[in-house]
Image (cartoon, rainbow, N blue to C red):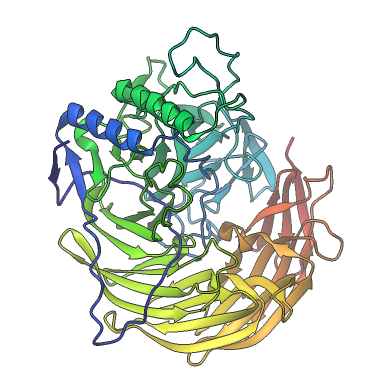
Amino acid sequence: MRGRSIVSVATVLVLAGSTACSRSSGPHDPPVPAPPMRLVAYDGCDALLDGLRKATADKVGPYGLTDGIPAFGLPEGDTALRKGPQAAQAPGGAQGSPPQHSTTNSHEAGADEPDLVKTDGRRIVTLADGELQVIDPATRKVAHTLDIPGPEGIGPHGSGQMLLSGDRVLVMTQRPMMIPYGRPSGPELDGSSKPARPSEPGRPAPSTRLTLIDISGAPKVVGTMTTEADYMDARQSGSTVRVVMQSRPRIDFPTRDDHGPGHGPRDEEKAVEANRAAVMKAPLDAWLPAFQVDAGNGGAGKKYQPPCDQVSRPASYAGSSMLSVLTFDLSQGLGDPQAIAVTAEGSTVYGNGKSLYVTGTPPQPFVPMPRRSSAKPPEQRTDVYKFDVGGKGRPRYVASGSVKGDLLNQYSMSEHDGNLRLATTTSRFDPGNRSSESSVYVLAQRGARLDEIGRVDGLGKGERIFSVRFMGPAAYVVTFRQVDPLYVLDLTDPRRPRRTGELKIPGYSAYLHPAGDGRLLGVGQDADKSGRRLGLQVSLFDVKSEPRRLDAYRLPGANAAAEFEPHAFLYWPATGLTVLPATGGRDGGGEALVLKVEGDKVRRVGTVTHPMDDEYGRSIRRSLIVGDTLWTISDAGARATGIADLKERAWLAFD
């Protein structure tokens, strides 16, 4: 396969990261050069097909591709209160400024993130049980309801995610993959005519649907897009949305029957040989994802695929999976998604409106028996791709790099003054390995490369990262095994980052949020000296100099949704109001815990609960503020509560 290096290519993706680290870095310790992680374009469709076949054949095993079931549908978010998108016209056509309102708790101000609730101050739009609910917060009534067609499955309750721009709502839903209980059988590998046992049903292809809805009046669908690719994540800047998809080869493998005899090395070799032969015969459409778009004007739908000249691969390896980035302008509707693709694995996306970073780990070739047991484990590594998404058209690839270890989530990344900072951990997935440690890297763009220019090592030895927050030139990293070290790092000089403080307290913070005036809120778990978790703990830290905990609120036996889903966290800077959906507290049910940060104290104001129409309907999933009203949302409905007194103003049941 021939390739050509490209410094600027229209390509976007999203990949997953994890954690890692190594030795300590000092002023006279030269940085380790990153591997050649530039992207390489293919010379036409023939070269692309040849490269995909070879990469897939290298990975295939006796049962086909054993990448496992991807963890899609739960894109992480994180919290930073910011100015939301421009408010659209009210349902009744009223003009003027909307009331003050909170917005989705997103990582960066310039890149809105999908969630199950959105508001522009005049409308609250939410998804519940496959229906779009449009609430008028002024009259405190459900103004409109619309059934969302297509599969359900994104998120813990299968209700999808959405983005809001003016009068347009983009809803993303996906049918979850089903894990088969058995592998399909096929003909004998030696070519004999012995009939095969009946095939068992294999894993159905995933189905993702994007639905564009106009909510200027009664909601109506104005466009749809369907695909077999997996939805990964999306980011929105203005009316421009970038949607990241991942697809795997759709190949019928003549896999042996694993219920019968013959599981030795020779049988495995025959199975691998037969599967590789199937790969080398597969057409290009087995890899290229297809996106079927219906513009909603009654005309025939159109199918789009990434053009061969818009597909690239990392220079250091060739992947069998494909990451696609789609671009839509919601004000113009759903048309050509301008798909670009990279033949690589990925799952973690970070964006700030100008740059989009995707991180991932390189694929590993199949190792046959008996060498499998003696094979050296692959080095933990996170590859990083940077794309320029400042315009409205296709993104532009600008640079790539690599660091050791694995990322926790998108909050482990942050761009500041043109440099990318990353926090990683080594040995994260081996609970018995106490040699793990964490590091913070600083990467600078040099041409088409992201090169390491600074590094801090040795954080949390024997522990792993539980949360990260970058704030300007500072970084805050929490690691945990038995106690919670909160590390403070000064990144003012990106070439000489340094640790400036450390605080060790019981428990840990799984989410960190800026609270103004050099303070941080930490949401996590209290723990005893052995590391046993005791319940919800909300800590207020002073990090202006040497870190110290000012106060903490504890709720024994409870968990907060913000520990694993930052979109569930609400902090209102004007008053210090902090709202956390929590479960397993005093009565074991779901509630919204309302706290208030006042000076150096965190105090409990009260709770908000929803009617228990079934065992799940009471669990509050999100909260938001419009004017002087706190709105809490569950699958059962929405409750309006006065901010000042927490008295109920309205209950809106979702039919």
Residue at far right of view: 587
**Residue 225 higher or lower than 559, as above or below:** above
Question: Does residue 42 sit above or below 95 in this rendering?
Answer: above
Q: Residue at x 44, y 27 (%)?
A: 271
The front one of 260 and 14 is 260
Kindly identify the residue that appears in the image at 34 percent across and 46 percent down.
Answer: 13
Vertical comparison of 573 with 347: above or below: below
Residue 89 seen from this side = no
> Which residue appears at 59% of the width and 57% of the height?
565
Residue at 38% over, 47% down: 364
Number of numbered discs on residues: 0
The percent position of residue 360, horizontal first and vertical second, equals 38, 53
Residue in front for this viewpoint, 118 or 507: 507
The quarter of the picture where the C terminus appears is: top right
Q: Is residue 298 visible?
A: yes
Q: Is residue 180 left or right of residue 545?
A: right
Q: Quadrant of residue 452?
A: bottom left
Residue 627, x across and y down, in percent: 61, 61
Tell me if residue 274 comes above or below residue 300 in the rendering: below
For the view shown, which residue lies furthest in the bottom direction?
A: 546
Rendered location of residue 29, percent (x, y):
26, 83
Q: Quadrant of the N terminus?
A: top left
Residue 298 spot, x, y in % from top left: 42, 16
Q: Residue 649 lies in what quarter of the image?
A: bottom right
Q: Is 496 left or right of 520, judged from the image as shown? A: left
